[in-house]
Amino acid sequence: MTLTPVSSWASFGGTLSVHDHESAVTGTTMRFAVYSPPQAKKGPVPVLWYLSGLTCTWANVMEKSGLQRTASEHGIMIIAPDTSPRGPDVPDDDAYDLGQGAGFYLTATEAPWDKHYRMDQYITRELNALVAANFPADMKRQGIFGHSMGGHGALTLHFKYPDTYRSCSAFSPITSPSRVPWGEKAFTAYIGPPSIAWEQYDATELVQTRQTDAHILIDTGKADQFLETQLKPDIFIDACETSGQALTYRMHEGYGHDYYFIATFMSDHIAHHAKALKA
Ligand SMILES: N[C@@H](CCC(=O)N[C@@H](CSC=O)C(=O)NCC(=O)O)C(=O)O
């Protein structure tokens, strides 16, 4: 599979690079970013996947979170995929929470979305293989984290593929899309009316039967405008307690849903993954 270079910058002794490739899974050109730390010049390093939230591309986290400093210190490679397939032939919606930029890390089964929207398969299979083949990545040491829609995506992919994504954390995740407006709207469009399929893409449902040995870290702001309507941390905290899933859920006075919040706690999250992956 051929990678087309888009941009590259030196950063904290490592390299931030952006790449395009033709995706057989989404049927589109996909773009992603890689921060390769200085340690990768000497051999394979652990890999940490960051799944972004609604409206985002690879750029939000790479440009706003300051992750390069801590990733460089710990010798961790960070991969930032896009949040959906994109392009003039890809179905879209006028609203920011459906269509392009809002892929929800699932495989759509409903028309017109089912032709391209397969972000879970894209990330876990195609992009995984592409990273393994093209970068000095130690694929036996992978973790996953993300923000909001992407924080939820990270939780679900960790619960479904715990041997691949051995460590997990999230910033301000949606915890149960089946129970909140963002998720109800997207799931109805992408996978149809409420059914067993909804449970398979809902972190709060998954943790009840697929709890893992990992210790999950979550940070959320108490001033997050989506806290009570879309995120609902208590649902997930209760489910983790019931299932025995180890979880540290921190709530932070005054912080919102933005990248100022993410930047504040980014180093804690990278350190959390570095410890679990023994970077
Ligand atoms: N534009 C919308 C809100 C969109 C928004 O807040 N997006 C978040 C992720 S929300 C959950 O997935 C985000 O990360 N935005 C990009 C950024 O750089 O901040 C509205 O106006 O309500």
Image (cartoon, rainbow, N blue to C red):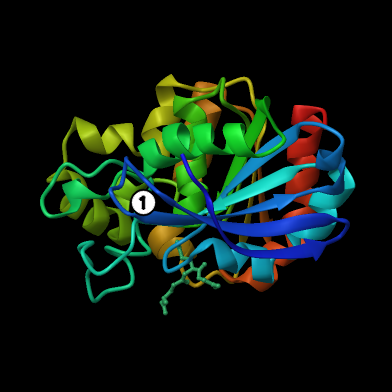
Residue 254 in sight: no
Camera-side residue of 162 and 227: 162
- Say whether residue 68 is left or right of residue 2: right
Q: Quadrant of the C terminus?
A: top right
Q: Report which quarter residue 258 is drawn in.
A: bottom right
Q: Report which quarter residue 6 is drawn in.
A: bottom right
Q: Label 1 belongs to which residue?
A: 104
Camera-side residue of 260 and 100: 100
Against 179, residue 244 (above or below) is above
- Say whether residue 237 is left or right of residue 272: left
Residue drawn at (85%, 43%) of the image: 74
Q: Position of residue 163 (x, y in %)?
A: 56, 20
Q: Position of residue 182 (x, y in %)?
A: 32, 60
Residue drawn at (54%, 61%) of the image: 58
Against 139, residue 62 (above or below) is below
Q: Position of residue 170 (x, y in %)?
A: 59, 48
